[in-house]
Image (tube, grey):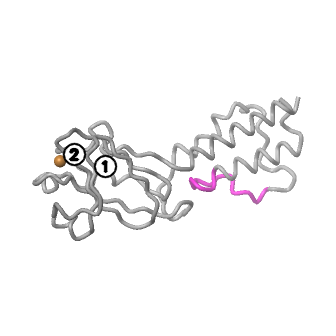
Amino acid sequence: MATYGVLVCLMVILSLISFGSAKVYTVGDSAGWALSVDYTTWASDKTFKVGDSLVFNYDSSHTVDLVSSGDYGTCKVGNSIASYNSGTTTISLNTTGSQYFICGVMGHCSGGMKLTIDVTSDGSPSAAPTPSSIVADSPTTMPLGTTLPPPKVSGTSNIPVASSSQVVSPFVAVVFCLVALMSGLIVG
Ligand SMILES: [Cu+2]
């Protein structure tokens, strides 16, 4: 009986953990890495963290060049730190700080093919100040709906149940599951 509850809890925990960890961002979404895309706008609503990655999709008329801040500002080509032209380039974000990408084809950077992102450390709550509607809704999708225990179980009323933080939510769910299991409330 209780085995089913344990399995459900483990699945919920694993899905929440994977949801809250590394993300893969396709630069420009379906438009890819191309002229006529505003990458400042594209990046403006995203929070990049260490462990995330960028995927550039582009045709053979473009390249992806990792450049310095100065070369980014002046759209200087031919001085890149690294340059890619395979058509599909995945950049792993391994360090915090700003990163600068331009297209190395003359005129394309000034034509808009330039992207800068700010990479923050993984697990930094202050990096995601905006309310997260997706994460806040996830617990309601648990297949436990009707058997979900009330917040106040075994004197754990100090758990920040209503937190909107992307970092805290999975943790709360994990604690919920553990508390529920230990209390024998989830019996499948
Ligand atoms: Cu280009």
Task: Tell me where residue 88 appears, x and y as whole percent.
Answer: 32, 41
* Magenta residues, start to end: 157-169
Residue found at the very far bottom of the displayed protein = 70
Q: Residue at x 28, y 40 (%)?
A: 87
Q: Is residue 145 left or right of residue 164?
A: right
Task: Tell me where residue 40 appears, x and y as whole percent.
Answer: 27, 55
Task: Please name the amino acid that badge 1 sits on.
Answer: Trp
Task: Please name the amino acid that badge 2 sits on.
Answer: Val
* Camera-side residue of 95 and 125: 95
Q: Secondary structure at mark 1?
A: helix
First in residue order: circle 2 vs circle 1: 2
Residue tagged 1 = 42
Mark on residue 37?
Answer: 2
Mark on residue 186?
Answer: none
Q: Spatial distance from mark 2 to mark 1, Cα to Cα?
A: 8 Å
Q: For the residues labelled 2 and 1, say whether their Cβ atoms are less than 8 Å apart.
A: yes
* Camera-side residue of 146 and 11: 11
* Camera-side residue of 182 and 91: 91
Q: Residue at x 34, y 62 (%)?
A: 99
Q: Callout 2 environment at 10 Å: few (<14), some (14 to 19), or many (20+)?
A: some
* Camera-side residue of 110 and 89: 89
161 magenta-colored: yes
Q: Which secondary structure type mostly characterizes the magenta part of the structure?
A: loop
Task: Tell me where residue 152 appears, x and y as whole percent.
Answer: 81, 50
Task: Tell me where residue 166 appears, x and y as whole percent.
Answer: 56, 53
Q: Say above or below: 67 vs 183.
A: below
Quarter containing the C terminus: top right
Q: Residue at x 68, y 53 (%)?
A: 171
Q: Secondary structure at mark 2?
A: loop
